[in-house]
Structures are given as structure tokens and as C-alpha cells.
Image (cartoon, rainbow, N blue to C red):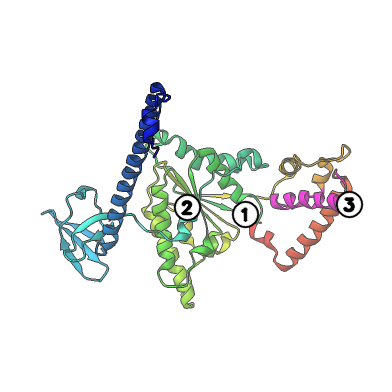
Amino acid sequence: MVTVDDDAAVSPAVDTQDWHRWLMEETERFESEKRQFESELSRLKRENAHLKGELARLRAPPQVIGTVRDMLADGRISIKSSSGPDFVVHTSENIDREALLAGDRVALHRQTLAVLEVLPSVKDSLVMGAEVLEKPSETYKDIGGLRKELDELRSTVELPLLKPELFDAVGVEPPKGILLIGAPGTGKTLLAKAVANATDASFIRLIGSELVQKYIGEGARLVRELFQLAHEKSPSIIFIDELDAVGAKRMDVGTTGDREVQRTLMQLLGELDGFTPRGDIAIMAASNRPDILDEALLRPGRFDRVIRVPLPDSEARLKILKIHSHSMSLTRNLSLKKLVRKTEGMSGADLRALCVEAGMNAIQKERDKVRAVDFQRALKKMRNRLTEADQKEPEQALYS
């Protein structure tokens, strides 16, 4: 704080205007400091109120989790508590009783068991992770050949999702499920991703083996939650890859694990029966072993359409090679048409691997362009691998 001694205060040399200016500056400085202190005090009060609220929340007694059984006519609700027995309880005033449904999870008062709030449904992390959050990047342009199969798939999956009003106007239900069968690498999964890209639907992909669980009832629960997630995320596409892992034919005898797989299959059959397609959810599955699938899966009303995805013909192989070599640096004298004649019996995945292998040969030779000799070496390597695989398991016999 600035002080002025007595001699200076009475000295005629002190200018009155300077003294007045100094007083004004000091006053403004004090006012600024006052505003800062008031702002800090307001912030501390808000923080104190927040901490009090947090402390009160932490001191609140724990709540009991229950499941709604039934809504009674007198306004009370029948619930099953986590402790086991059923109770008839009242609801809090902030609960919309008409919005409550049987099976909803609710939080109950610890002493009176009154319903305090509705809890979100809990799903297994495996089911939640099945949703592909990013839109699939594959489009119809990435598919070589398969014109007939693609047209049928678009009319049975894409059209109900994009124009459900057409089915309502005609008065028919779209096919319930689409099953893609074919040898490995023919593009079954690629077809499903392309449809999901074209429809902007939520794409939920799960491998059949992931539904096979260790404990009794876990696989059936996953199937049930999978269909619940599809309804919540609609419009959506459920794609079950490698369906034969959970949809194999049921046997009279078997181990405990086999019986658990059969329980999961029966849950899947039940969900397909209870599922009513109205253009907002599509069910797709793929399998390269249709010979072992249970007949109950293939009957009308479950998987109505079975689309066989064949090995690509010469025209389709040429298109597939152009798709995968589009971004590669090729020499001018390289003829893909001549290469197509030597790729008889190869699948789309084999042709993609052929292009990658040819590019690797060029990189190993430290060249910036891929030559015909690189494809010849890659083709020889691929042929040797395919021959060894055919000797182990003749897959083509399954699709003749």
C-alpha cells in the first residue's frame, strides 16, 4: 500500500492533479482485485456444492437389481429381486409405468424394494463387439463376377431395407434369411459387406464358433442378445459367418459339449421362427460345408434363400485380377488375359493372393514394376499350395 509522509502531503511541490490521478488508479486496481476475488469465490462455491452432492451420492445406500415379471392392474409391479424371491412393489413417481415391459432390469430401494429407476439392458461384450462400427469399405465394384448371385442378393436383402413400402403395398413378407454357400474364398463375406455398405445399415458380424461357449446356456443367451442388439440398432444386418460351427446336424448321442451346441442351435432356430422381417433387419449366414448343416435350418421360414457362390469363371477371374492389380505398377507387356487361362479353379481369394505374391517377388528383386515372370513364379507357388491342399481334403467334391 502506497503511503505519503506528512512533509510530502503539505509540500506545495506536490501537484494536485498527480495526486488525484494516483487515487483513481489505486481505486481501479482495488475494483479489479475485488472482481477477481468474487469470481474465485463463486467458483469455489460451485465446486463445494458439487463435492457435497458427490459425497451425498456416495453415502446413499446401495440399490437392489431386479427384473420386471408382470404389471398388475392396481398399479403395482411384480418383480424378481437379485436375492431370488418374487415381490409385488410400488414404483417411484418419476417412473413411466406404461413404458415398463416384462423383462426390464430395474433398480429397487434396499428396504421397501420400490422401483426407483429403469436400468439399461446388459449384453455380453462378445455381442457388443460384434457390431462393426465403421461402415464397410467394400462395394459392389470390388466384386468380380457373381452377377446372378449379386442380383438375387440385392433383391432379397437390399431392397427390403431400402424400400420396405413396396413389400407392404404388394402384401408379401421379404425372405427371412439368406444363406450363402460355396467353397472357401469365393466371396461370401465380401457379398455381405458390400450389401451393408449399400444400405447404410448397422452391420453385426459374428463367427459361428464364437456362439459355442463352455457353460450351459451361455451360447443360447448370446444368440438371444444378438437378435436384441439387431432390433435396437435397426435397420441392421446380422451376418453369421461359418454357420456350420453351430448349425451342424444333431445327433442322438454325443458329449456334453455337443449337447450344448445343440441348445445353441435350438435357440437360433427359435429366434428365426419368432423373427418377423419388415424391412428393418436382415439375416445372412455363410458356410462352406452345407452338407453338414441341420435340415431344420434350411426349411422355408428360416433361411428362405440359399445362394450358391461358385468359383469364378474366366470372365470373372479377369475382372478380379484387374481389381486387385489396379494399384500395382505393371509392365506394359504383361497380359492379364493370358494369365487368366492359367488360373482355372482358383477362387477370388486365391487370385488376390496371387497378385500379392507377384508384387512380393518384384520387391525381393528390388524392382519398381511387376513383370510377367513375377506372376509366373507366384502362380507356380500357388499351384503347389493348392495341390497339397487338395490332396489333404478334396473340397470340390462337396460342390459338384
Q: Which mark is residue 303?
A: 2
Segment tinted magenta in the rendering = 342-368
Question: Where residue 252 sits: x, y (%)?
Answer: 46, 75
Identify the residue at horizontal 29%, vertical 59% (top origin): 55
**What residue does disc 3 label?**
365
The CA distance from mark 2 to mark 1 is 16 Å
Vertical comparison of 200 with 352: above or below = above
Identify the residue at horizontal 40%, vertical 69% (top origin): 217
> 73 left or right of 294?
left
Q: Quadrant of residue 34?
A: top left
Instruction: Tell which circle, 2 or 1, labels the residue nearer the N-terminal end.
Output: 1
Q: Is residue 247 visible?
A: no
Observer-nearest residue: 179 or 260? 260
- For label 3, the SS is loop
Q: Quadrant of residue 168?
A: top left
Q: Are marks 3 and 2 in contact (CB under 8 Å)?
A: no
Instruction: Tell which circle, 3 or 2, labels the residue nearer the N-terminal end.
Output: 2
The CA distance from mark 3 to mark 2 is 50 Å
Q: Specify the quadrant that holds the C terminus.
A: bottom right
Vertical comparison of 327 with 357: above or below = above
Queried whether the magenta region covers residue 42, the answer comes back as: no
Question: Where residue 43 sits: x, y (%)?
Answer: 34, 44
Question: Where residue 364 sits: x, y (%)?
Answer: 85, 53
**What residue does disc 1 label?**
182
Q: Is residue 395 visible?
A: yes
> 358 left or right of 257?
right
